[in-house]
Image (tube, rainbow, N blue to C red):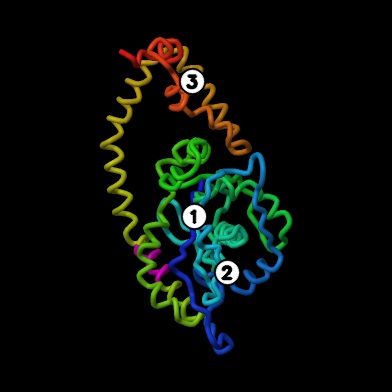
């Protein structure tokens, strides 16, 4: 499985130029910034397909996107979106796109497609993408790809995930359906590495905000290439350090798991394993199958209901636990 993380950065915006015709482009799509001509052709035919009704994904409102969708005539780019390796944090070539008005699906569709095309997937059959709003984004992804001849995705199985920080801002159901902790083969990955990369990139955002678009693209390309280079030369030390830490902690983790298993009824453990395996086999086509991982408890009495109780005798009849003692 190859793992990616995608995100938008609204600090990397750009003020509209007075004379854009005077801009001189030295590069076009040969670095981290995507090919602007092909990207423009894609945007002409791309459409937004916000899901509605049952199965539309998380119903929570994402304030960052709502705020970003408010247009501003001062800017010709309200931010950027891109894709990076979820494990190593290397930017994917050609995946950096400008947002015209907020973080739209059409922008991230192109970013994902270019990242998958330019990262040499080869025979890798499964790809996991961690995206902050994957619960909504994936619902009509296949429909958008089918209707857009400019948008080409490789034939791979897509594992849909949300980073372990952002997933707690969603509905409770999203945790079991999209958290990387419940995806077989994902390993230990938080899906938030782009947040650490943005914190460094934002140091140059002030200087690129009023630069020409061509100069801005060159600066961002140079910064991202430098980031990838530093990760490449330091990856051996990093992997060795993490491996030693994993080996040191493996014994304690295994002991905890064995103690937890021994405390449960063996027949119940067998049943749980079967249910989990079935849910994991179905999760790609039906993420709701992972809801079985949630706690199975009876619905608690509401505070308003309890407040209407007139005496202790009423509480004893309705509460399943001896809270009155």
What whole-number distance in Å separates the C-alpha atoms at marks 1 and 2? Answer: 18 Å
Measured from the top left, where is residue 3 in percent x and y?
A: 49, 49
What whole-number distance in Å separates the C-alpha atoms at marks 2 and 3? Answer: 47 Å
Is 288 on the left or on the right of 210, as rendered? right
1 or 2: tag closer to the N-terminus:
1
Q: Is residue 268 above or below residue 120?
A: above
- Residue at 57 percent across and 69 percent down: it is 100
Q: Main secondary structure of the magenta part?
A: helix
- Residue at 62 percent across and 69 percent down: it is 39
Measured from the top left, where is residue 160 in percent x and y?
A: 55, 45
Task: Give the foreground label among 1 and 2.
Answer: 1
Closest to the observer, 15 or 230: 15
Q: Is residue 323 above or below residue 64?
A: above
Q: Which mark is residue 102?
A: none
1 or 3: tag closer to the N-terminus:
1
Q: In the picture, residue 306 is in which quadrant?
A: top left
Q: Which residues are magenta?
A: 223-230
Q: Which mark is residue 100?
A: 2
What residue does disc 1 label? 63
Is 210 on the left or on the right of 279, as rendered? left
What whole-number distance in Å separates the C-alpha atoms at marks 1 and 3? Answer: 33 Å
Measured from the top left, where is residue 79 in percent x and y?
A: 49, 67
Task: Indicate yes or no whether the magenta region holds residue 92.
Answer: no
Is 313 on the left or on the right of 299, as rendered? left
What residue does disc 3 label? 298
Secondary structure of residue under mark 1: helix
Spot the residue most to the front: 310
């Amino acid at each position: 499985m190859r793992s990616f993380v995608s995100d938008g950065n609204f600090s990397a915006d750009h003020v509209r130029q007075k004379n854009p015709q005077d801009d001189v482009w030295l590069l076009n799509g040969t670095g981290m910034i995507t090919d602007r001509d092909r990207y423009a052709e894609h945007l002409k035919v791309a459409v937004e397909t916000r899901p509605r009704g049952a199965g539309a994904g998380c119903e929570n409102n994402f304030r960052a996107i709502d705020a970003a969708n408010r247009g501003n005539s001062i800017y010709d780019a309200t931010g950027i979106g891109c894709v990076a390796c979820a494990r190593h944090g290397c930017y994917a070539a050609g995946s950096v796109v400008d947002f015209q008005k907020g973080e739209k699906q059409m922008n991230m569709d192109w970013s994902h497609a270019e990242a998958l095309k330019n990262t040499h997937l080869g025979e890798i059959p499964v790809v996991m993408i961690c995206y902050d709003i994957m619960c909504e984004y994936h619902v009509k992804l296949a429909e958008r790809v089918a209707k857009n001849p400019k948008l080409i995705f490789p034939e791979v199985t897509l594992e849909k995930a949300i980073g372990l920080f952002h997933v707690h801002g969603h509905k409770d159901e999203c945790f079991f359906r999209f958290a990387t902790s419940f995806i077989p083969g994902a390993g230990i990955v938080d899906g938030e590495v782009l947040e650490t990369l943005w914190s460094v990139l934002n140091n140059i955002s002030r200087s690129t905000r009023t630069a020409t678009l061509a100069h801005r693209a060159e600066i961002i390309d140079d910064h991202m290439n430098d980031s990838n280079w530093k990760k490449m030369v330091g990856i051996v030390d990093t992997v060795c350090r993490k491996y030693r830490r994993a080996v040191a902690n493996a014994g304690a983790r295994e002991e905890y798991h064995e103690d937890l298993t021994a405390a449960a009824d063996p027949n119940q453990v067998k049943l749980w394993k079967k249910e989990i395996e079935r849910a994991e086999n179905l999760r790609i086509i039906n993420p709701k199958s992972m809801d079985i991982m949630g706690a199975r408890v009876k619905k608690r009495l509401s505070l308003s209901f309890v407040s209407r109780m007139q005496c202790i005798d009423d509480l004893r009849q309705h509460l399943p636990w001896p809270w009155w003692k």
